[in-house]
Image (cartoon, coloured by chain):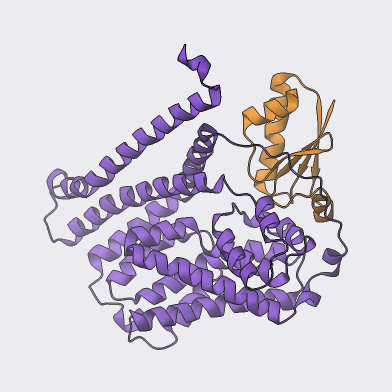
Chain colours: A purple, B orange
Amino acid sequence: MTSELMPSGTKSSAMAWLWVTLAGVVWVILYGVIFQASEWISYTLLELPRGSHAGEAVAFFFYDVPKILLLLSGMIFAITVLRTFFSAEQTRRILSGKREGVGNVMAASLGIVTPFCSCSAVPLFIGFVESGIPLGVTFSFLIAAPMINEVALILLWGMFGWQVAVTYIVSGMIIAIAGGMLIGRLHMERWVEDFVWKMQFGGAGILEHRLNWSERFALATDAVFDIIRKVGPYVLVGIGLGAVIHGYVPTDALADYMGKDAPWWSVLLVVLVALPLYSNAAGMAPVLLSLVEKGAALGTALAFMMAVVGVSLPETILLRRVLKPQLIAVFIGIVTLGIIITGYLFNMVM
Amino acid sequence: MKQIKVLGPGCKRCMQTVDLIEAKAREVGVEVTVEKVADYAEIARFGVISTPGIMIDGKVVHAGGLPRSEDIGKWLMS
């Protein structure tokens, strides 16, 4: 009888919350036992001697694979639920009419939470510019959206701790805000393809549909499976490689090349290598972890991660449709410079 | 006959969206014509900034990400 008093949406939302809470409890229990499980598999089941190269490598693999997968599932779920409250259209409405400065800060923040796919970069750029959002503010969004990448964030957090994850977000935000303001100051409007300014932006408007909780959770569950399917293989290969480095490469072997006292150009080199790599953030991260363990400097590692996710070749090629080469060059130059500075600063402070 | 436009530059998700709509239309027995719109000027004119967007009989019903099958069913039946 009570079900008639409750609208059906409320009831299915309550059920959805129940499932999510249960899944959360299972998650916490799993996360709590993976360390013991990895030790048991390596030293009891496989009877590898403690302290041996093989034992260390196997234990590393069986601890890191479930840990990263659990962190990924949990965080992607939470982030996707958060993102169902945002949309590119809504972000455009919020940003239109904002002045530079405040606008840049808001654009960089919204860049983190707004669902964004590099394939939408062009329509988004046109939509932003056409609704009067200043060019610099638009760029703050375009820099932050890919650079502050949830997969990279989770991996950095899982492997290096939350301090590094926070540093990553803060540096990404600063690069996006400063980069956008700089592009605004340089008055680069003439380097936007002319047809963009002549375009008619329609106000047809999307029929907004308010999602209920069970729909939000369903979307988040889909996203988790999607990400695991997409980055799972990279994580496996990456952690496998990482495990070998962890077990077999002597500690501090890399200190000379990538460590704090490495030649000044090591950050520069690492960033330049990382720029053309794309979407393999998940596979790179475990390798980075092992490199850092063996003496590479954390700032160098962080710069590498930011360069992998922050500048993507496919997105750059798409943006060429609306931006002239000069502006593309300035855009990539500013982002690259920002990442390199972050790497050096981080190496100096830590 | 419903006139459906899928707005997007031709990325993987846009193709999947077209397939999803065609499959759902067959399933519920609604006749549709699905047209792909890849021209940015055209997409912008409809006010869509996250792709793929879906337009049914001149109304934008969806923008950004793959639509869910139940939702497509709802749009086709209404």
The reply to whether residue A312 is in sight is no
The image shows a total of numbered marks equal to: 0
Q: Please tell me in which quadrant of the rendered image residue A287 appears.
A: bottom left
Q: In this view, does A143 lie above or below A70?
A: below
Give the image location of residue A305, x and y in percent. 46, 67
Please tell me which residue is depicted at 25% across the width and 56% down the height of the picture. A60
Please tell me which residue is depicted at 62% across the width and 37% down the height of the picture. A210
Of the 4 image quadrants, the one containing the C terminus of chain A is bottom left
Give the image location of residue A321, x and y in percent. 77, 64
Q: Farthest top residue?
A: A1
Task: Determine whether, in the image, residue B46 is placed left or right of residue A344.
Answer: right
Give the image location of residue B77, x and y in percent. 74, 23
Q: Farthest front residue?
A: A5
**Residue A302 or residue A132, whichever sits in front:** A132
The reply to whether residue A327 is in sight is yes
Please tell me which residue is depicted at 58% across the width and 59% down the height of the picture. A110
Q: In this view, does A191 lie above or below A117?
A: below
Please tell me which residue is depicted at 75% across the width and 70% down the height of the picture. A323
Q: Is residue A49 above or below residue A228?
A: below
Task: Determine whether, in the image, residue A284 is placed left or right of residue A37.
Answer: right
Give the image location of residue A40, x and y in percent. 16, 46
Task: Determine whether, in the image, residue A63 is placed left or right of residue B1.
Answer: left
